[in-house]
Every structure is written in C-alpha cells, then in structure tokens.
Image: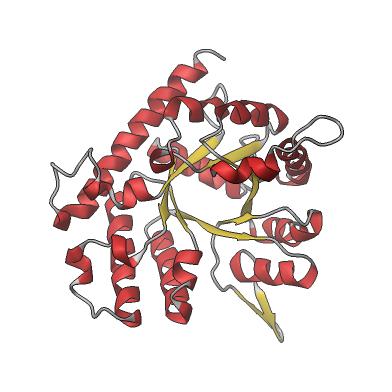
C-alpha cells in the first residue's frame, strides 16, 4: 500500500510540479474586488478569505499538487476562522489536491496525542472515532524530543498520514539556536536531522522516502546539501522561495538524481501575484486568480529547469 509520501510524490509527478501553494491570507492582502462584497467585520472578513482561497484553489488545482494553509492566519479570527480553515482544507481535497496543515505543534503526552487526533488521527467518543480536520500532512516542532512526535508517527502508520518536522527553518534568526554547536562539533540542526532520519525509518514508502520528513529552508543552500546527506530518505518541505529570497538553483541541491526530494512552498508570491512586478502590468486586480496561475506556471518551470540542471551533475 502506498503511504502518504508516495501519494504526494505521485501527485508531484502527475502535475510535473514540486510546488505547494501556501494559503496564509491576511484581510489587508485580499483584492478589493473580494473585500467589497462583504461587510468589514469578523464574519465578512472570514467569508472574503474563504472566497479568496477557493478562487486560488480553482485556479491552480490542475497544476499544483498541494496547498499549505498556515493555521495562525485562521485562528486569529476565532471559531469562524477555524471553520474557514477546515472548509479550505476540504475544498482543496475535493479538487484533488493534498493538504499540508502548517500547525507547528510541539508538546508531549496526551497533549501531543490530542493534537494528532485533531489533524491526522481521529477523536474517540464512546464507541466511535471522528475525523476532524483530516489533512494529509502536518508540520511539527521537535524541541521537546520524541515524546512530542511519537503520537503523530503512530497516527501516520494507522491512518496513512505524514509529518514534516522543523529541522532548519528559513528565517534569519534561526541561526540563534539551530546553528549552535554541540559538544561533538555538530550544529543543533544536524542533531535534529539525525533524529528525524531515525524517526522516519518505519515510514519509508515505495519511492524510498519517508512520511516522517523535514522542513528545510530555501534560504540556507549550504545546509540543504548537508541535510540531504544526513537525511537521504526525508522529503524536504522547503519554505523561503520567492518573497523570502530562496533561489531555484539553491533549492535544487535538496533533490536527488531522479529529480525527487522536495516540495517548495510559495505563499505571498502566489497569493499576491497580481501585485507583483512579474504580473501587475498583465492582469487587472479582478483577474487575481489568473495571475496566481501564471506565477505558479512560471515558478514550476523555473524550479524544474534548476532541478534538471542539478541532476545532470549527480
């Protein structure tokens, strides 16, 4: 049976696109043609965000394999926002896309189990168990060690789901902790990578990658190379492309000779493509979804070209 990472890889192959669209909507970034339809209050903002998300999903569902909604941008609107999060996830899945919920949870024991139940497992009530958000993958913070990850690994096995564990993140201040040297001279991110590599051994799929994989930032190309060697079976979720400055040729270092190994996130550069230098003179604001599709194609082609050049050297 194919596991979660196999399904993601096959969706990437089907679309010929190693891209995930981040859905991190802020009310002030929505085009006026959406905002003006709804009252400027809590309920109206949530309705506008849901329409925006659905429009973007409709625009790219045949060419982008997955979406990655960051839950903070929904939690900030309270219960209504969480409903939008769930509806966004369900809508993406109904359009054939996989869903990576960017939740970055990190706690232990029954708390970790509760988080896992909510997102990739099931919530038991009496003799029944209920799927709540039922996404395909989640992101996790491993700072508390295996105790914070084990419940998710168990649910990955039971429900054919996946996790991406933070190893080396794309933000500048990540060096304050992640690059600190340990007694044996290795950086903390290298030690975390070794743990993720061992945690993922039981979840390796048909394509040779594990459903317990890693978040590795595009803004640190040297570390991408180092981490590929430490975690040969980890699929990399790679943030930092586009607005954060990650370059396609650097990202390609995380891919193997078969052109596999990573899925690259773009959030602002896709959601706000209609405002970008690339497309603002081509598309009117009302055509924001068409601009997102155009940028997704441009990103796909740029990544595939860089990955192709990289694989020639392997």
Nearest the eye: 13 or 2: 13
Nearest the eye: 28 or 218: 28
- Dividing the picture into quadrants, the one containing residue 134 is bottom right
Nearest the eye: 88 or 148: 148
Does 149 appear above or below 51? above
99 to the left or right of 227 = left
- Residue at (38%, 45%) from the top-left corner? 64
- Dividing the picture into quadrants, the one containing residue 43 is bottom left
How far across and down, in percent of the image, does residue 132 sit? 56, 74
How far across and down, in percent of the image, does residue 81 sit? 43, 75
Name the residue furthest right.
183
Name the residue furthest top.
313
Residue 204 seen in this snapshot = no
- Residue at (39%, 65%) from the top-left corner? 91
Labels in figure, total: 0
92 to the left or right of 227 = left
- Residue at (21%, 53%) from the top-left corner? 288
Q: How is the image coloured?
A: secondary structure
Does 165 appear above or below 148? above
Residue 229 seen in this snapshot = yes
- Residue at (42%, 23%) from the top-left corner? 306
- Give the quarter of the figure containing the C terminus: top right
- Dividing the picture into quadrants, the one containing residue 204 is top right
302 to the left or right of 280 = right
């Amino acid at each position: 049976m194919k596991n979660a990472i196999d399904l993601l890889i096959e969706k990437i192959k089907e679309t010929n696109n190693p891209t995930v669209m981040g859905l991190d909507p802020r009310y002030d970034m929505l085009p006026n043609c959406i905002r003006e339809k709804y009252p400027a209050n809590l309920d109206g903002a949530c309705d506008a965000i849901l329409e925006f998300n659905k429009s973007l999903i409709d625009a790219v569902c045949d060419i982008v394999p997955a979406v990655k909604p960051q839950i903070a941008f929904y939690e900030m609107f309270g219960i209504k926002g969480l409903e939008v999060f769930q509806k966004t996830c369900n809508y993406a899945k109904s359009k054939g896309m996989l869903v990576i919920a960017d939740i970055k949870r990190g706690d232990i024991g029954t708390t970790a189990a509760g988080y896992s139940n909510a997102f990739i497992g099931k919530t038991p009530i009496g003799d029944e168990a209920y799927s709540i958000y039922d996404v395909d993958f989640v992101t996790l913070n491993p700072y508390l060690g295996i105790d914070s990850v084990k419940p998710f690994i168990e649910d990955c096995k039971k429900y054919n789901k996946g996790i991406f564990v933070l190893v080396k993140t794309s933000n500048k201040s990540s060096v304050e902790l992640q690059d600190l040297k340990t007694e044996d001279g290795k950086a903390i991110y290298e030690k975390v990578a070794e743990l993720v590599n061992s945690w993922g051994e039981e979840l390796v799929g048909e394509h040779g990658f594990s459903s317990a994989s890693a978040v590795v930032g595009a803004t640190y190309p040297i570390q991408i190379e180092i981490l590929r060697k430490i975690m040969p079976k980890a699929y990399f979720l790679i943030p930092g492309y586009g607005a954060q400055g990650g370059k396609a040729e650097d990202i390609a270092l995380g891919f193997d000779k078969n052109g596999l190994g990573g899925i690259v996130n773009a959030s602002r550069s896709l959601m706000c493509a209609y405002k970008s230098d690339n497309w603002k003179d081509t598309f009117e604001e009302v055509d924001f979804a068409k601009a997102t599709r155009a940028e997704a194609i441009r990103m796909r082609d740029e990544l595939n070209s860089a990955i192709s050049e990289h694989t020639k050297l392997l």
